[in-house]
Image (cartoon, grey):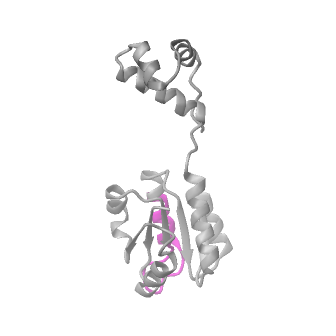
Amino acid sequence: MNTILIVDDNTAILTALKICLDGVFDRIITLSTPDNILTTLKQEHVDVVLLDMNFTLGVNSGQEGLLWLRTIKKLHPDVPVVLVTAYADVKLAVRGLKTGAADFVTKPWDNDELIRVLKDAVDKSEVVVPLDQLESEHVRKVVDKCHGNMSKAAELLGITRQTLYNKIKRPTPSPLP
């Protein structure tokens, strides 16, 4: 796992999450206010966001979290967002999922379950490229590198010219949706 962005206004929660997720993610970026989410996502490659639902003291509606979720999904649709809140509310969870959240976790969380949810969110967001497509792209790059010299390209690839011609004639598989 690479990078997680955790956004929660409670510094004790941020510390606990950093301890829990240390070793699971290579980088853990924390924000105690959502104001810098978009700047951070623009400057950093983030694999998953763990987003608190409430940031204003005394407000527990989850509307702030939903607003930030919509904003993140609009500008960074490929970044999975897992919502977290101390106020378990099934309707709120459903609204979050319908708005584009990858999943929903309640405080206090179970460490193993939290890690599983975050890993699942990242795994679901990663596109697996078919082997045929990788091979086709690599063959095209080698041919381009050799400026169309098929003999040289075939030699670099360790195949015969006829095999190279056959690989080039094959239609390129379309990427997965």
Write down the quadrant of residue 162 in the picture.
top right
Q: Where is residue 89 in the image (x, y as percent from the top left)?
A: 65, 76
- Left or right side of 91 for 23: left
- Residue at (42%, 19%) from the top-left corner? 153
- Residue at (53%, 30%) from the top-left corner? 135
Write down the quadrant of residue 101 in the picture.
bottom right
- Residue at (47%, 68%) from the top-left corner? 25
Query: Which residue is at the front of the view, 1 or 53?
Result: 1
Specify whether residue 100 is in view.
Answer: no
In the displayed structure, 25 sits above or below 74; it is below
Count of numbered circles on the image:
0
Query: Which residue is at the front of the view, 39 or 131?
Result: 131
- Left or right side of 30 for 50: right
Q: In which quarter of the image is the C terminus?
A: top right
Q: Where is residue 92 in the image (x, y as percent from the top left)?
A: 62, 71
Residue 148 shown in magenta: no
Q: Where is residue 78 in the image (x, y as percent from the top left)?
A: 49, 51
Query: Which residue is at the front of the view, 90 or 83?
Result: 83
Specify whether residue 142 is in view.
Answer: yes
In the displayed structure, 77 sits above or below 113; it is above
In the displayed structure, 5 sits above or below 32; it is above
What are the residue bounds of the magenta stretch? 52-71
Q: Position of residue 1 (x, y in %)?
A: 50, 62
Query: Which residue is at the front of the view, 151 or 48?
Result: 151
